[in-house]
Amino acid sequence: MVQRAGRIAGWAARTGYSLGRRLPGADSAERSLRTLEQKALGELRRRLEGAGDPYLATLNQAPSTGRNLTNGQVKGRAVTVVTPDEPLRVAMAELLNRSTGLDRDRSRDYLYAVILRQLTPDEARILAALADGSPFPLVDVAERTGLGGAGRVVLRNASTVGKAAGVTLLDHVPAYVTRLVGLGLADIDEEAPALSTQYEILLTDDTVRAAEQLVKRPRFVRRTVRISPLGVSFWQACAPK
């Protein structure tokens, strides 16, 4: 279902869906798309709430005494869970203790659960739009140097993928894309000439235009964003059926 939503979202960005909304039946199609997205996000939210948080779990389980809690071994070294008066140390000790009992599959699920807990609903939408592997245009706005190169960057990772995914906070799309790249779920690649029309549309975006006003001689660095290999594996494991 979410893969279908992602494919529709990707098609929308590449074919100028905003114009298509004027066609007969387009309103119904848009409502159907948003219904699919809402169901998908609901399932992601349920998985999110079901994922364990080692930090909170450790605090909830820790007794109120001042003594050490448990001892274990990690690669031949003792691991001690310290008192709940030091919650950061408690959480780290819990992670080290858990590492001794995780096989490959459980370690992968644990990693994906931690990543999932960091995603916002808007970022889940963007990931759904990227899920079919198609690239989306991405632009940085920088100040042009005397030699024509790019100097100070005033905006990074503006993209049409947010509008295609139907995110709520369109002005936060650059931050969303940056976070997805930082989590390893998306990759930034070279400019795609086939997306020339979409680049021109992106340059009229309000966020891009506002950044353009911050420099005297703006330079637009064109690139693309697409789902990463980790993002593919993560999506296959987490996408609602």
Image: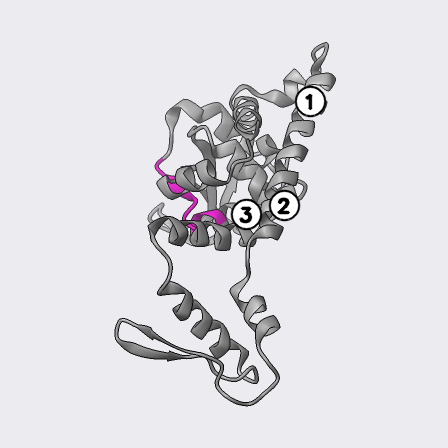
Alpha-carbon span between mark 1 and mark 2: 20 Å
Distance from disc 3 to disc 1, alpha carbons, whole Å, reads: 25 Å
Is residue 218 visible from the viewing direction of this image? no
Q: Is residue 189 magenta?
A: yes
Q: Earlier in the sequence, mark 3 or mark 1?
A: 1
Q: Marks 2 and 3: which is nearer the front?
A: 2
User: Looking at numbered disc 1 in the image, what kind of residue is underneath it?
Assistant: Ser
Give the vertical position of 227 relative to 5 (above or below).
below
Q: Which residue is mark 2?
A: 45
Residue nearest the observer in this picture, 224 or 35? 35
Give the class, few, some or many, for how many residues have Cα within 10 Å of label 3's Cα (few <14, many ≥20): many
Q: How many marks?
A: 3
Looking at this view, name the residue that lies furthest to the left: 76
Q: Amino acid at mark 3?
A: Tyr
Is residue 120 a member of the stretch shown in magenta?
no
Q: Is residue 121 left or right of residue 89?
A: right
In the image, residue 143 lies at what x, y percent? 45, 50
Q: Horizontal placement of 112 versus 79: left or right?
A: right
Q: In the rendered structure, find residue 108 and report the number of the disc placed on it.
A: none
Chain-order first, disc 1 or disc 2: 1
Q: Please give the range of residues in magenta.
A: 180-190
Residue 11 pos. (x, y %): 53, 21
Give the residue type that dot 2 points to. Answer: Arg
Q: Nearer the viewer, residue 16 or 9?
A: 9
The secondary element bearing badge 3 is classed as: helix
> Which residue has dot 1 on it?
32
Residue at 51%, 23% in the rendered image: 14
Q: Mark 1 or 2, which is nearer the eye? A: 2
Residue 206 percent coordinates (x, y) = 63, 40
Looking at this view, name the residue that lies furthest to the top. Answer: 24
